[in-house]
Image: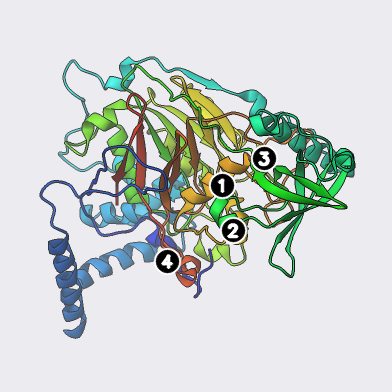
Amino acid sequence: MRCKNPVSSDSLLKYGWEIKTEPEVRVQLGGVKEGQSVVEESPKGSDKSKRASNGADNADNKQKDRDMGGNGESDERDSGQRRITDVFLGSGILLSGLAVDVIRERRIDPHKIIERAREKNVFLVTKEFVEEFFPEEGREEFSFVVKKGRPALASTIEARIEIDRAKDITGNSISEGTVKNFIDLFRDRYKRLRNILMNRVNLKDAVDIENLSKYQNQEVKVIGMVRQLRRSKNNNQLIEIEDPTGTVLVVDSSDAAKRRTILVEDEVIGVVGVPKGDLFLAKEIIEPDIPMTKQPAECEDPVSIAFTSDIHVGSLLFKEREFRRFLDWLNLRGNGNRREVAESIKYLFIAGDLVDGIGIYPGQESELAIPDIYKQYNYLSRLMEEIPSYIEVIVAAGNHDAVRRAEPQPSLAHFLEPLEELPNFHLVGNPAHVRVHGVDVLMYHGTSMDALISALPHLSYDKPERAQVEYLKKRHLSPIYGTKEQIAPEEKDYMVIDFVPDVFHCGHVHKNGYANYRGIRIINSGTWQAQTDYQQQQGHIPTPCQVPILDLQSMQMRQINFA
């Protein structure tokens, strides 16, 4: 996302800097109906109006300080911060905002910290670095025990995880970018989606397009890929479809809104209709869709999945303090805050954009706190290593990550070698099919959502779950070819949804969203990045630091807010 104004050099030192507040954790219990968003409930005893009033009072106090010539406590604090940051500016070593706080409060000489950082070959001084090498005098070492004699519930339950490597592009890419590769890709897409459609009772006896002339004025069925969409003078929808044997122009005069089928180019559909000369008059348009007879998943163990995405480590807008609250919560540090939920977390799914990346869009360098891709992943790995070892972490890539832009994307194994060595970390491609405790999860970052939202008028960035429903109806994760979202021409189309998941998890749009579509729990897990200038210009309001949790026993959703 683009900054309206260039960022000054000392803004780099604001990385992670926010006013200290205790985490306010809000929880929504219960199931989620189709198209219904999860609504948070404030914790017991909270008073939103009081907080709003306090915020206004604080703003007034700050204004008074400025009016009085800056002689307030905030000016004193800012002055202390600036003295510290000025020392670091010329050192070539980055400093996180959380570290500034510790250095200022303990009155540590910043020159000594720089000297120690160089000794340790550290490029970014964090709060943990300062606390480890410059411990507070007389401070007792902190050790955390969940409850004496009782470990976290999830740590006592054996993990059951299966990764479908046949649906993962990692290590399986054979594309050379030739015309033949593209032909193979679309033939595979057509063949597999045709097989799904042929399982529909009303399409079992579909014929090839080249044989339509044999059925003039008779009802017949065909399956084809949408080649072109346009409108006639009478406002009928004209759909040119093709199969390996030929093409035909379908005239659809039915009410698209009434039958709730909105088509895009390159998707595969079934058509029931009557041939009239060179035209095919449609009576019914059928998408592959999810069967109505899906059986619900069953899990006997009291375990849960946490879902997240779009962390954007390395960005000036990465909400580090809140993310550390999340890590503390996973480690059961502190009291309350839905502790029983934290104890049940057995799996953590991360749907891409782990770091902000380098060169993703023009002018990005002015928005980076860590302007080196390797150091971004380095810092990310250090954060990830704090996740308890009994939690199985499944990690995929996104469009900001350092893998090929074209989808499907391989895993981040090359950049996350320290995590790959940990037995509880599983690096997968994008998309990925993972079964945990008998529950099938389809995880996809969601890059093609941009093209889908642009193409379909009923979709928006405010309701990402609606776009995910369209993916399921079309049984494809990138149905529109030829947009800025690139598709790698593999021999097999890894973007086809040829199984029926229990959970469909995406990210990318930085907005939490939830739905229940034909028994499938749809989840968009938001972000850990604050609103960018570009998002502000577009009127897009992200929902950072909100983590959806799915209880696998009851299949009930709740959302916990770490902001």
Q: Is residue 481 visible?
A: yes
- In this rendering, the label closer to the viewer, 4 or 1: 1
Q: Amino acid at mark 4?
A: Ser
Residue 33, image quadrant: top left
Q: For the point 21% across and 81% down, which residue is it?
A: 66
Q: Nearer the viewer, residue 286 or 48?
A: 286
Query: Quick one: SS at disc 4?
Result: helix
> Measured along the vertical axis of the image, is residue 102 above or below residue 9?
above
Q: Amino acid at mark 2?
A: Leu
Closer to the chain start, of discs 3 and 2, is 3
The residue wearing badge 2 is 456
The residue wearing badge 1 is 470
Closer to the chain start, of discs 1 and 3, is 3
Q: CA distance from mark 4 to mark 3?
A: 36 Å
Position of 509 with respect to 242 (left or right) is left
> Measured along the vertical axis of the image, is residue 432 above or below residue 445?
above
Position of 21 with respect to 124 (left or right) is left
Closer to the chain start, of discs 4 and 1, is 4
The residue wearing badge 3 is 408
Q: For the point 50% across and 59% down, which residue is it?
A: 460
The residue wearing badge 4 is 11
Q: Amino acid at mark 1?
A: Glu
Residue 148 on image: x %, y %: 16, 19
Q: Is residue 133 visible?
A: no
Q: Amino acid at mark 3?
A: Pro
- Disc 2: CA contacts within 10 A as few (<14), some (14-19) or many (>=20): some
Query: Quick one: SS at disc 2?
Result: loop
